[in-house]
Image (tube, grey):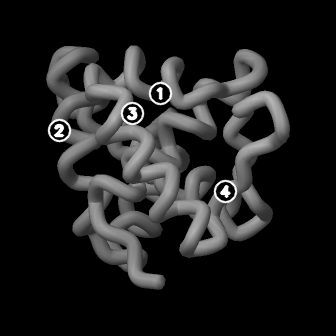
């Protein structure tokens, strides 16, 4: 299943929220500012794609494949945000722009940005 930007955003959000504890659909809806029906539909698609499961009490649990993808998107976001702030972009704008770029950037460009950022710490 090839993920669209919105699916990647859901996975990243679930991953970030899971670092704080159990995650339910309502948590995702509140974090992303989406309606519960929209989140419910996305959860259904992600379950169908094998990216997450839902336990008996409604907690969203990333599968290995889901966690791998979510970590990848989160790392990309983090690297891009750091890079942009090093260029002098404000934290909020850097994070917002990184969120847009993370879905289209090539692995080659991201690797180059990682190397550049690491060498300038």
| Disc 1 target residue | 28
Q: Can residue 29 be seen here?
A: yes
- The earlier-in-sequence mark between 4 and 2 is 4
- Residue 90 in the image: above or below residue 18: above
Q: Going by the picture, which residue comes out furthest to the right?
A: 56
Q: Can residue 85 be seen here?
A: no
Per the image, label 2 sits on a secondary structure element best described as helix
Per the image, label 4 sits on a secondary structure element best described as strand
Per the image, label 1 sits on a secondary structure element best described as helix
Instruction: Specify few, some or many for label 3: CA neighbours under 10 Å numbering under 14, 14-19, or 20 or more.
Output: many
Per the image, label 3 sits on a secondary structure element best described as helix
> Which is more toward the observer, 59 or 104?
59
- The earlier-in-sequence mark between 3 and 1 is 1
- Residue 5 in the image: above or below residue 118: below
Quadrant assignment, res 69: bottom right
The image position of residue 55, as x and y in percent, is: 81, 42
In this rendering, the count of numbered labels is 4
For the point 39% across and 24% down, the residue is: 29
| Disc 2 target residue | 97
Gap in angstroms between the C-alphas marked 3 and 1: 25 Å
Instruction: Specify few, some or many for label 1: CA neighbours under 10 Å numbering under 14, 14-19, or 20 or more.
Output: many
Q: Which mark is residue 52?
A: 4
For the point 20% across and 30% down, the residue is: 96
Residues at discs 3 and 4 in contact (Cβ within 8 Å): no
Residues at discs 4 and 1 in contact (Cβ within 8 Å): no
| Disc 3 target residue | 82
Instruction: Specify few, some or many for label 4: CA neighbours under 10 Å numbering under 14, 14-19, or 20 or more.
Output: many
- The earlier-in-sequence mark between 2 and 1 is 1
Tell which tag, 4 or 2, sits nearer the viewer: 4
Quadrant assignment, res 17: top right
């Amino acid at each position: 299943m090839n993920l669209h930007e919105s699916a990647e955003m859901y996975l990243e959000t679930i991953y970030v929220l899971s670092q704080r504890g159990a995650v339910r659909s309502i948590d995702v809806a509140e974090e992303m500012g989406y309606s519960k029906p929209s989140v419910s539909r996305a959860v259904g698609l992600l379950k169908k794609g094998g990216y997450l499961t839902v336990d008996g009490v409604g907690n969203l649990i990333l599968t290995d494949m889901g966690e791998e993808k979510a970590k990848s998107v989160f790392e990309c976001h983090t690297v891009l945000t750091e890079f942009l702030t090093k260029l002098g972009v404000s934290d909020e704008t850097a994070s917002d722009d990184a969120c847009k770029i993370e879905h289209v950037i090539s692995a080659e460009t991201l690797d180059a940005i990682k190397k550049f950022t690491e060498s300038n710490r």
